[in-house]
Image (cartoon, rainbow, N blue to C red):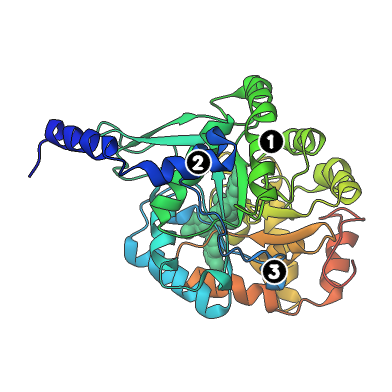
Amino acid sequence: MASRREFLALSAVAAAAGVAAPRLMAAQKDGDNDQGRRDEALPKQPPLAMDLFPPELHYGAGGTQMGNMYRVTSDEEARAMLTAAWESGTRYFDTSPWYGLGLSERRLGRFLSDKDPSEYLLSTKVGRLLTPDASVESVGMWKGNLRTDYRYDYSADGVRRSIEDSLQRMGVSKIDLVYIHDLAPSNEDMGQEWKQYFEIARKGAIPELERLRDEGIIGGWGMGVNDIEPSLAAMEAGSPDVILQATQYTLLNHRDAMDRLFPVCRERDVPLVIGAPLGSGFLAGSTYWMYKTDIPDGFRDKRDRISAIAREHGTDLRTAALQFTAAPDVVAATIPGARTAEHARENHASMTANIPADFWDALKSERLIEQDAPVPGQV
Ligand SMILES: NC(=O)c1ccc[n+]([C@@H]2O[C@H](COP(=O)([O-])OP(=O)(O)OC[C@H]3O[C@@H](n4cnc5c(N)ncnc54)[C@H](OP(=O)(O)O)[C@@H]3O)[C@@H](O)[C@H]2O)c1
C-alpha cells in the first residue's frame, strides 16, 4: 500500500500531468470560481420532494428518540419505529446532527437508503458541526457512548459544511428542508448571547440558505428553535419557507404562540411545523415536561382532567394533544417523536381518529384550553 507521503507525491505528478485539468477548467468556466468550489460537494439537482409539503394528515415523525434521548434506543427499536411509521403512511421525517451527535441521522439515512427520494420529505438542521472525540460519552440528554463532540457554526461556510456532512452521514441524495437549529435564548450554551449568534446567522447562514434554496440545492429553510423570539427575528432578517417551532404550542401552553407568532406567520405566509407536541412526553403520560422533570404548578392536575374528559368522549389525551397542535391554519405539520413501532403506529392512528366536537367544547367550558384556541373541525 502507498504511504501517505508516496500518495501525495503521486497526486502531485498526476496534477502536473494535467489529470486534474478538467475540473479546474469547469470551475473557471463557471465565472465564479469560489462559489463553484464551495458548492462542489453539494448535489446540483437533487430529487427534492417539496410537493409532499405540507405532509398528508399534517403529520410527520420526529427524530430525537433515534438519537438516544433520555435513554439508549437500540438499532432494532429505531428501525422498527421507522418501518412502522413508513408502513402507516408517514412520509415526512425530521432529524438533526445534534440528535445523538449524528446517531439519529445515521439511523434515519440507513432506513431511507432503499427508498425512492421522491417519495419522502426529509428535514435536518444546521448550526452545530460534529467532530470525533473518543473521550465523549453521553452529552446532556443524549445517552450512550457517542464519541463525538460539537461546536457551533452559523456562518455561510459552516452551514454548507453541515449540509455536506449530513448528506454524507445519512447517505442520501437530498435534504428538502434545512432548519437553523437551537439559535435561541433557552439554549443553555447561549442564553442572551443568542443575539450575537443570530448576527452571525443573519450575515452567514440565512443568506446562504436562501441562495441554496434559490438554486434548487435545498427545498427551503427555516428556524428550528424552542423560543418565539428567534422565529420572529428570522422572519425579519430573511424569507424563511417554514419555521419549526418547538415547545411553544401544546394543549398546555399555547397563548403566547397564538398572540405573538401566529399573526406574523399569517402576514408573511410562513407555515409552522410544531416540535415537541407532546411536551416531550408529558402529554403521552411520561414524567418529562419540555425535557425536564420539574413540572410547572397545576400541569399534572390539568393533564389528568383533560385525560378524564377525553376518556368520557371516547378519545385519549395523546390523540387530543396531537390533533390540537395540527389544527391551526398556520400549522403545516406536527411532528411527535416516537421511540417504538407501537408509538409510531399509535401516533399515526391518533391523527386519523375522530374526536367529537363536544370534547373541545368541554375543555373550553372548563377553561382547560384558551377560549379562542383553534380546534380540529372548527378552524
Ligand atoms: N429546536 C428544535 O428544532 C426542536 C426541539 C424539539 C423537538 N423538535 C422536533 O420535534 C420532534 C418531537 O419532539 P420530542 O420527540 O422531543 O417530543 P414529543 O414529541 O413532545 O414527545 C416525545 C416523547 O413522547 C413519548 N411518546 C411518543 N409517542 C408515544 C406514544 N404513542 N405512547 C406513549 N408515549 C409516547 C416518548 O416518550 P419515551 O421517551 O418515554 O418513550 C417520546 O420520547 C423531535 O423529534 C424533533 O424532530 C425540534
Residue 120: give x, y in percent of width and height: 57, 69
In the rendering, at what x and y percent does residue 307 appear? Answer: 69, 64
- Which amino acid type is marked by label 2? Ala
Q: Quadrant of ligand 1?
A: bottom right
Q: Is residue 25 left or right of residue 289?
A: left
What residue sits 39% from the left and 68% below the top? 79
Front-most of 229 and 143? 229
Upstream in sequence: badge 2 or badge 3: 2
Q: Identify which residue, 46 or 114, lies in the foreground.
A: 46
Determine whether the residue tagged by mark 3 lies in a helix, strand or loop.
Answer: helix
- The residue that label 1 is drawn on is 207
For marks 3 and 1, give the one nearer the viewer.
1
Task: Give whichever of discs 2 and 1 has the lower sequence position.
Answer: 2
The quadrant of the picture occupied by the N terminus is top left
Q: Which residue is mark 3?
A: 51
The front one of 303 and 77 is 77
Toward the front, the furthest residue is: 17
- Left or right of 53, for residue 123: left
Which residue carries the number 2 mark?
27
